[in-house]
Image (cartoon, grey):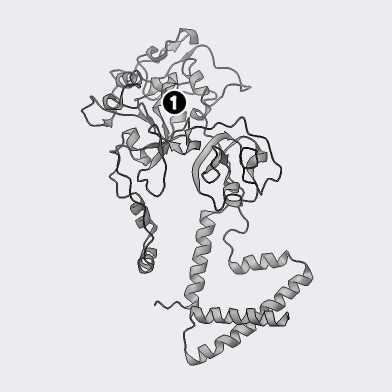
């Protein structure tokens, strides 16, 4: 049996406190219901068996012992925990509220994800899943044709105590590599793109389809059903770099056929407000502005016309992988801007609510004890200090023979000490 000194034990407790502070740095004492419909992390409680979502605070305070799935950020969502749609009582928001009729509940709230509809199980899932910027659903890498679909891994058994000690000595990187099951890299790595938009959402937006497969917006395609998947490389048929074509009126623009010859980098054009949203009080976009959309990618346009094809005959899912800074590169002419404004997340990065930081996070047990002591009435605080000093003196007296004889203090010895304290306290109350 391994011998652990008191110094080692105290150090291990400090490490555990730091890990807890990093994992849960926020204060989870207030339900977000009163904040209204916001973009926030949402959790699905499988134990409650209702297709509703709860906030981070309620997932910890109200549903601690329930089985949950983290759905990650959802926009325009209000916590369902204190409403009539969830049977379990919310302990943070005491008032029972009516059902949130404005919340949207997609397949994720049935624990179904991706276009394949497979249920998610963190214990067996090997693949990284990617969240769509627009619909906020999650997609398997294999369903985006980034890799072959791996078989589900078996649930990892609990390690033997001796194996657990060895595992604890390993690095976090080792744990992460084991969690990914050493899958080979996909066609597109996570460092190569900033955001992902699924094919269905892209097919509903004229501007996204117009830009699909162009520079900075990568797609995964294949030339024929029997061919392997590959990255769609954008090759402009334009040999020169002419002046951008001017659109005189939005009504004359004809979607993807507008301006077939465009500069590849519209970022050098200066607009007074490139991120102005519809409803802004600023001046409207002039009716005569250059359309800077790049030349349409023929294969990308062909894929969107065949999205309903069977999987075996599909040449692509229409998914888009947008490189960093994509919001600054959009064309904002009267033809391209309105479809982007219909999906504001394409123009402006959204803020996601985070609970306030916990002032007690990272404090040691002694510091937490002192804070608790400061909150007590003076007479009870004095009694607590006397009791602590008495226990300290008894512990020193109990441990002195071990130090004099050079004996190791075992866990059983410590348990015996506190058992004797309990027995003494019972006798004093008789």
Query: For this view, does 266 lie left or right of residue 343?
Result: left
Residue 15 percent across, percent down from the top left: 49, 65
Q: Is residue 395 visible?
A: yes
Bin the neighbour count of mark 1 within 10 Å (Cα to Cα): few under 14, some 14-19, many 20 and up. some
Q: Residue extending furthest bottom?
A: 405
Picture quadrant where residue 320 is located:
top left
Residue 256 percent across, percent down from the top left: 39, 15
Task: Identify which residue, 343 or 329, lies in the foreground.
Answer: 343
Quadrant assignment for the N terminus: bottom left
Residue under the point 52% across and 22% down: 342
Give the answer, above or below, for where 217 lies relative to 207: below
Residue under the point 44% across and 27% down: 329
Q: Residue extending furthest left?
A: 226
In the rendered image, which residue does mark 1 sit on? 201
Task: Identify which residue, 405 or 126, lies in the foreground.
Answer: 126
Residue 143 percent across, percent down from the top left: 34, 34
Secondary structure under tag 1 reads: helix
Residue under the point 57% across and 61% down: 362
């Amino acid at each position: 049996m391994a011998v652990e000194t008191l110094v080692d034990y105290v150090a291990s407790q400090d490490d555990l406190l730091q890990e807890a502070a990093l994992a849960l740095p926020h204060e989870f004492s207030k339900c977000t219901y009163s904040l209204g419909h916001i973009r926030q992390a949402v959790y699905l409680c499988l134990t409650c068996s209702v297709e509703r979502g709860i906030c981070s605070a309620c997932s910890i305070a109200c549903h601690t012992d329930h089985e949950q799935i983290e759905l990650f950020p959802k926009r325009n969502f209000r916590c369902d925990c204190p409403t009539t749609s969830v049977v379990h009582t919310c302990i943070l928001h005491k008032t029972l509220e009516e059902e949130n009729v404005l919340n949207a509940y997609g397949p994720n709230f049935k624990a179904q994800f991706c276009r394949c509809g497979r249920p998610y199980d963190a214990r067996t899932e090997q693949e990284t899943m990617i969240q769509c910027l627009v619909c906020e659903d999650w997609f398997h890498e294999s369903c985006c044709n980034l890799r072959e679909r791996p078989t589900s891994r078996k649930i990892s058994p609990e390690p033997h105590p001796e194996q657990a000690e060895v595992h604890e000595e390993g690095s976090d990187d080792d744990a992460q590599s084991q969690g990914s099951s050493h899958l080979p890299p996909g066609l597109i790595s996570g460092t190569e793109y900033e955001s992902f938009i699924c094919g269905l959402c892209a097919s509903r937006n004229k501007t996204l389809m117009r830009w699909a497969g162009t520079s900075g917006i990568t797609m995964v395609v294949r030339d024929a059903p029997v061919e392997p998947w590959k990255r769609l490389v954008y090759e402009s048929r334009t040999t020169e770099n002419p002046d951008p074509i001017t659109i005189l009126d939005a009504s004359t623009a004809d979607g993807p056929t507008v301006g077939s010859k465009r500069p590849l980098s519209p970022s050098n054009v200066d607009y007074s407000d490139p991120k102005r949203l519809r409803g802004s009080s600023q001046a409207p976009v002039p009716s005569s502005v250059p359309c800077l959309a790049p030349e349409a990618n023929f294969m990308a346009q062909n894929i969107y016309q065949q999205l309903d094809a069977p999987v075996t005959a599909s040449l692509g899912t229409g998914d888009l992988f947008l490189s960093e800074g994509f919001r600054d590169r959009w064309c904002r002419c009267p033809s391209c801007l309105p479809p982007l404004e219909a999906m504001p997340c394409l123009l402006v990065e959204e803020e996601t609510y985070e609970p306030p930081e916990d002032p007690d996070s990272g404090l040691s047990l002694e510091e937490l004890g002192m804070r608790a002591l400061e909150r007590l009435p003076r007479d009870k605080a004095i009694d607590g200090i006397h009791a602590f000093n008495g226990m300290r003196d008894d512990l020193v007296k109990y441990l002195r023979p071990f130090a004099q004889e050079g004996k190791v203090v075992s866990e059983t010895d410590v348990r015996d000490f506190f058992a004797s304290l309990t027995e003494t306290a019972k006798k004093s109350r008789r």
